[in-house]
Image (cartoon, rainbow, N blue to C red):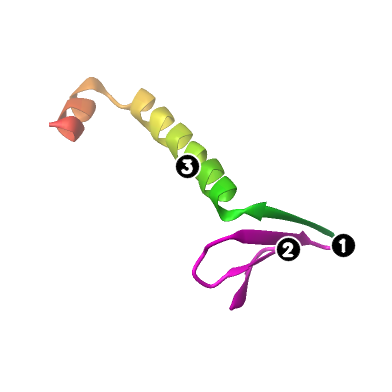
Amino acid sequence: MITQTKHGHVVFEHDDAFHGEVRIVKGELSVTVSIDALRALVAESVRYDLAARVARMKPADLLRRIA
């Protein structure tokens, strides 16, 4: 079953189990990409955010976090 998820002016049309392809629609424009491609993009964004957060941590905070 196809589900629509809206975020702002963008609509994502996807399988309700989040498999296969996603159609991304904004106004008259649309593109279809694989859910795996979107997952990879989001994973890189999360990796960047985590690395930036670790870089700002004080040494004591970092050691507490990994211990």
Q: Which of marks 2 and 1 is in front?
A: 1
Residue under numbered circle 1: 28
Q: In which quarter of the image is residue 57?
A: top left
Q: How far apart are marks 2 and 3 (CA)?
A: 23 Å
Q: Is residue 54 left or right of residue 44?
A: left
Disc 2, SS: loop
Labelled disc at residue 41: none
Numbered-mark total: 3
Which image quadrant: the N terminus?
bottom right
In primary-sequence order, the first of circles 3 and 1 is 1
Q: Where is residue 19 in the image (x, y as percent from the top left)?
A: 53, 62
**What kind of residue is marked 3?**
Ala
Disc 1, SS: loop
Q: What stretch is highlighted in magenta?
A: 1-27
In the orientation shown, which residue stands out farthest toward the bottom? 1
In primary-sequence order, the first of circles 2 and 3 is 2
Q: Nearer the viewer, mark 2 or mark 3?
A: 3
**What kind of residue is marked 2?**
His
Q: Is residue 17 magenta?
A: yes
Dominant secondary structure, magenta: strand
**Is the residue under label 3 in contact with that under label 2 (CB below 8 Å)?**
no
Q: Nearer the viewer, residue 6 or 24?
A: 24
Labelled disc at residue 43: 3
Residue under numbered circle 2: 9
Q: Position of residue 58 (x, y in %)?
A: 27, 24
User: Residue shown at 75%/62% (left/top)?
Assistant: 25
Report crowding for label 1: few under 14, some 14 to 19, many 20 or more residues within 10 A (C-alpha): few
